[in-house]
Amino acid sequence: MPTAAIIVAAGRGTRAGDGPPKQWRKLGGRPVLAWTLDALRAGGLTRLVLVLHPDDMARAAALDLRDVTCVAGGTTRTASVRAALDALTTAPPGRVLIHDGARPFVSPRVIGDVIAALDDAPAAAPALAVVDALWRGAEGRVGEAVPRDGLYRAQTPQGFHFAPLLAAHTAWPGDAPDDVEITRAHGLRVALVPGCEENFKLTYPADFTRADALLQARTPQMTDIRLGNGYDVHRFGPGDGCWLCGVKVPHDRALQGHSDADVGMHALTDAIYGALAEGDIGRHFPPSDPQWKGAESHIFLRHALELAHARGYALSNCDVTLVCERPKIGPHADAMQAELARIMGVEIGRVSVKATTSERLGFTGREEGIAALATACLIADRGVGI
Ligand code: MG
């Protein structure tokens, strides 16, 4: 039975201190929500609905949203969940999980247990038994002890069969701290499954310190390296030189193209998009759009790198190979290397530009055009320099 997940992330998180709302703070170089989405994907969920505050919609560009529908939240948590449920009604899932955006460390085990419990119950939720003694207290004094037997600390994701959840929400008049309360009020049985200590909710500044320590401890397993390759070809036409890797190389012809036809920079840009699984230049700068006619290719390269940075990656290194008989690349390779490094804001030693001929074979051998290949290696920001 297909299961969707709703991630509730429209709150303002004022208890977490100054700065952006807690779900947008950085953990290990990435927004908290990026970790939360990845945790749900690791649990096998592929249909995600992310509820955001209307003021935060632009921030979502920093996230990988390929399997995510973004929905504007309401003024209360319950209204936000309701907006997400409405978004799912066009193709209702059999089951839905509702998860706090500020719980980035939910494990596949917890997600799997909640989903499995829905085989026998209309609703299920993870929780941890209270182990500390509980007291009432006021004005700095300990009051009476409260028996902890049978008391649990609630976590998310809370899981539900979709139709009864929607009916419960429709019948519920106001706000509620979570969806278990709403479904119980509607008479649904909610199964209890074991939660996990690491599935804590980021609430106070100290929680971010704990989260950073947790990530640090996981780092050896989590070093995230992305490789991409790019390939491009442009044909020769009339002109007095070619733009190659940001350098105008004098020649008795020029490369033709919609933009400045910088074949080397296009291959490198595509390699970075490739490492991010973000298609190619044509997806981000359609050739059908006249505003890119004659465009300087550093616009494309900078865009690809900014997208990498927004996702929490830095360029570790890149390697570009130009394939042509003429013009001769060797005398210009250092200038190309320096220009690419300048555009990308990285040290020169992370950029390689080299060239080869094709022994007069094929279209490059016949000097009909120039081909370029590139490889880019991206590494999660926290991993660079370690
Ligand atoms: Mg091109």
Image (cartoon, grey):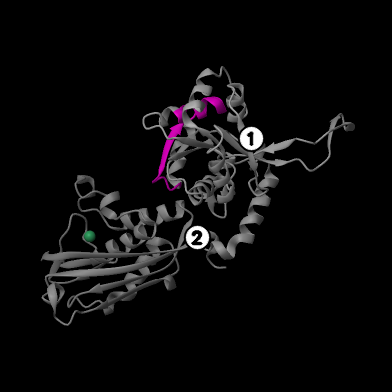
Residue 14 numbered mark, or none: 1
Q: Residue at x 45, y 68 (%)?
A: 347
User: Residue 380, which numbered label?
Assistant: 2
Residue at image position (58%, 19%) is 174
Q: What's the residue type where badge 1 is placed?
A: Thr
Please tell me whether residue 73 belongs to the stretch shown in magenta: yes
Q: What quarter of the picture does the C terminus occupy?
A: bottom right
The answer to whether residue 246 of the structure is visible from this angle is no
> Residue 150's x, y, as percent?
76, 35
Q: Is disc 2's CB within 8 Å of ligand 1?
A: no
Q: Residues within 10 Å of mark 1 (few under 14, many from 20)?
A: few
**Which structural element holds mark 2?**
strand
Amino acid type, mark 2: Ala
Q: Nearer the viewer, residue 317 or 227?
A: 227
Splitting the image into 4 quarters, where does residue 113 fall? Answer: top right
Please give the range of residues in magenta. 63-85
The answer to whether residue 226 is above or below residue 34 is: below
Give SS at disc 1: helix
Q: Is 81 located above or below residue 18 in the figure? A: above
